Image (cartoon, grey):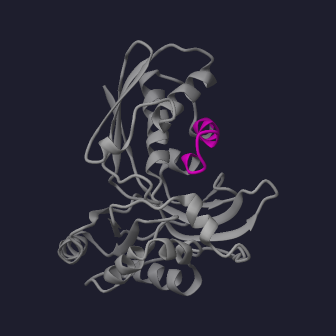
Amino acid sequence: MISELARPKINLFLHITGKRPDGYHMLESLAVFAETGDRVVAEAGAGLSLSIDGPFGDTLEVSENNLVLKAAMRLQDHIGRRDPGAALLLTKNLPVASGIGGGSADAAAALRVLRRLWALDISDEALTEIGVDIGADVPVCVASTTQIMRGIGDKLTPCPALPSCWIMLVNPLKGVETRAVFAARDAAQVTPPLEAIPAFETVEALAAWLSANTDNDLGTAARSLMPKIAEIEAALRALPGVHFARMSGSGATCFALLSDREAAMTAAEEARRRMPDTWVDIAPLSR
């Protein structure tokens, strides 16, 4: 039995830089990952099967549309055979449709765990190429390391190492559809690409740069569809120890950056007290 952690992807900023003729939006984003998330477990089995459990397990159904099974089938296509098989278990700890790439992270974790289970000599680069056909966020989730996303999310470049810090995630336990958010945004709004992303010695320096130079271009649209997002952002910014807070992706999950575990635990306790109707999690930023 082999397992992989499916870390959530958090967009510290998300800029829409244009739109392709085929309708896909071009973006620029600094994507980071947290040491928490769903878990994908695999063991040898006849054919492919999937079971789902966990706090948010009942929000998903087992079908070929599930990204974990889709990833497994794409990997079989890549190696050119339908054996070996695998029995897969997805423990769903992250809320769905929440702007932190949960489904994509699950698919990427499935690719990694099956590579190990089947002892395949396949690079991360090859898994990334397989992931493009599964979902726009799957490629960045394969390595689950800090990267700059461009294009439609498929063009990835390394980013200078970020300072050690903790991240808090807060979700209103309601989903907001990505398609609806894009439909609600000002289609004429585009943000020119940044010239460069500097290195940061401290989380305070990172927070100051994010505040002065970046935004989430989907934020206004998402807040118009779900005002609760604005309430969560404001509440996070008012918590002790929070250096920076913003919505991730197309929502509705918001995040806050904190210096260390003690600060994160204190802030999370206060967040749960002030926002009892939300899901709250804390974890160190992946290095």
The answer to if 127 sits in the magenta stretch is yes
Give left or right: position of 227 versus 172: right
Relative to 123, residue 258 above or below: below
Residue at 52 percent across and 64 percent down: it is 250
Viewport quadrant of the N terminus: top left
Residue 164 position (above or below residue 270):
above
- Using the image, determine if residue 237 lies above or below residue 272: below
Is residue 216 visible in this depiction of the protein?
yes
Q: Where's residue 69, x and y in %?
A: 48, 30
Is residue 29 visible in this depiction of the protein? Answer: no
The one of 164 and 140 positioned closer to us in this rendering:
140
| Main SS, magenta residues | helix
Foreground residue among 218 and 161: 218
Left or right position of 232 against 101: left
Residue shown at the point (42%, 32%) measured from the top left: 113
Vertical order, 261 against 87 (above or below) = below
Q: Is 236 positioned to the left or the right of 187 in the image? A: left
Residue found 59% across the figure and 59% down from its top: 179
Please name whichever residue, 19 or 2, is drawn nearer the observer in this view of the structure: 19
- The part of the chain drawn in magenta is 126-138
- Image location (x, y in percent) of residue 52: 32, 35
Point out the image quarter for the C terminus. Answer: bottom left
Number of disc labels: 0
- Can you give x and y, in whole percent of width and height, for residue 244 in the image? 40, 80
Q: Is residue 4 magenta?
A: no
Furthest residue in direction right, as rendered: 21
Q: Position of residue 13 (x, y in %)?
A: 54, 72
Residue visible at 47% across and 36% down?
66
